[in-house]
Amino acid sequence: MSPENNYDPSYAGSIDKILVGNTSSTTGITFIPGWGCQASDVQALLDHLSKDIKDFKAIAINLPDHGQTSTQRCPDPTISNFANILICICTELGLKDIILVGHSMGVRIAAQAALLSTNSTTPTIKGLVWIDGSNYTLKTTAASNMATISPEQRATAKDNIFQQMFSERTPDSFKASAIAHVAQMDKAYSESLMKDMIRWDREEMERVFVKLGEMGMPVLNLQSSEPVGMDRVPMREGQVSRYRCWVGEKMSEGYGSVSGRERERATPRLRQVAVVDSAHFPHVDRPGFVAEQIRQSLERLGPLRDQVEE
């Protein structure tokens, strides 16, 4: 895959990342944090998965303006460009088969990357794990109009939004680190990325999710909160949210006119799980539970496991 002209031609050495597991393996599991988040957010999850991914090359990356990665790695911040960078990194690291684990904005990047990685020169995406994704088209007008309000209003809204994304389980150290990281992001760059994320939801997400369903892409969708207005409300036991139903419907487009919940049950390549007693960061609040769900998905990917264990 050839990077577009506005990309640095080599990313593996210039992107801030965590690299663990079998660093000589060509089979990888790659973690993509959300907007304003960092690779270090998944450290507890990596610890819980250490035995399961010991044969994988495990990578958690900080995309431009996240962690210590410079905005110069990608002057034009868009979901598609970040997905392209992700594929370039995995290719440069010698990966042939990978599972992508995306949180929040990372869900979109992982989904887009799965469509980009479809030729013989790029790694094969064997499965996707989505952690607390959302769709701005399903939100209220106030939330979906984040891209149109003033910078001052957005700054206040983002502070408030981040605060209510934490749960009682969220460590104080993580809260402080997350808020401090958002405060030091490049304002213009991060706002441009946020605008494109909302645009992507409106113009691209449905097409991408339908295509993933057509491809038979194995997906584990973990949802820990439900967007309600400008807030994210923790999921309750047994709750089937609007977003989960929407995901099931779009990935099951060919199943006719049955209801969203029936489609969700009928789709063998899609597994949806509610993570309760958490908020927007289940991999921080409940890393053991999230690790167990990923572990079960790895066990379902027989061909990948066979290849890893050769």
Image: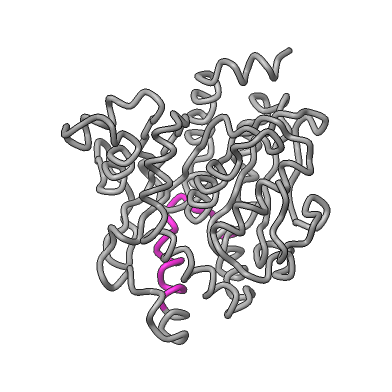
Q: Position of residue 156 (x, y in %)?
A: 43, 80
Q: Position of residue 14 (x, y in %)?
A: 80, 58
Quarter of the rendering containing residue 126: top right
Quarter of the rendering containing residue 146: bottom left
Depth order, front residue of 249/286 = 249
Split into 4 quadrants, where in the image is the C terminus? Answer: top right
Residue 164 drawn in magenta: yes
Residue 7 drawn in magenta: no
For the rendered model, the colour scheme is one colour
Please state if 302 lies on the left or on the right of 10 as rendered: left
Q: Residue at x 70, y 42 (%)?
A: 59
Q: Is residue 126 above or below residue 224?
A: above
Depth order, front residue of 194/53 = 194
Q: Residue at x 38, y 40 (%)?
A: 275
Quarter of the rendering containing residue 253: top left
Please state if 254 lies on the left or on the right of 279 as rendered: left
Q: Position of residue 162 (x, y in %)?
A: 46, 66
Q: Position of residue 170 (x, y in %)?
A: 49, 53
Depth order, front residue of 177/38 = 38
Point out the stretch of residues depicted in magenta: 157-173
Please state if 98 lies on the left or on the right of 145 as rendered: right
Depth order, front residue of 88/289 = 88
The image shows a total of numbered marks equal to 0
Q: Residue at x 36, y 56 (%)?
A: 135
Q: Is residue 66 above or below residue 183?
A: above
Q: Is residue 145 above or below residue 234?
A: below
Q: Residue at x 34, y 59 (%)?
A: 232
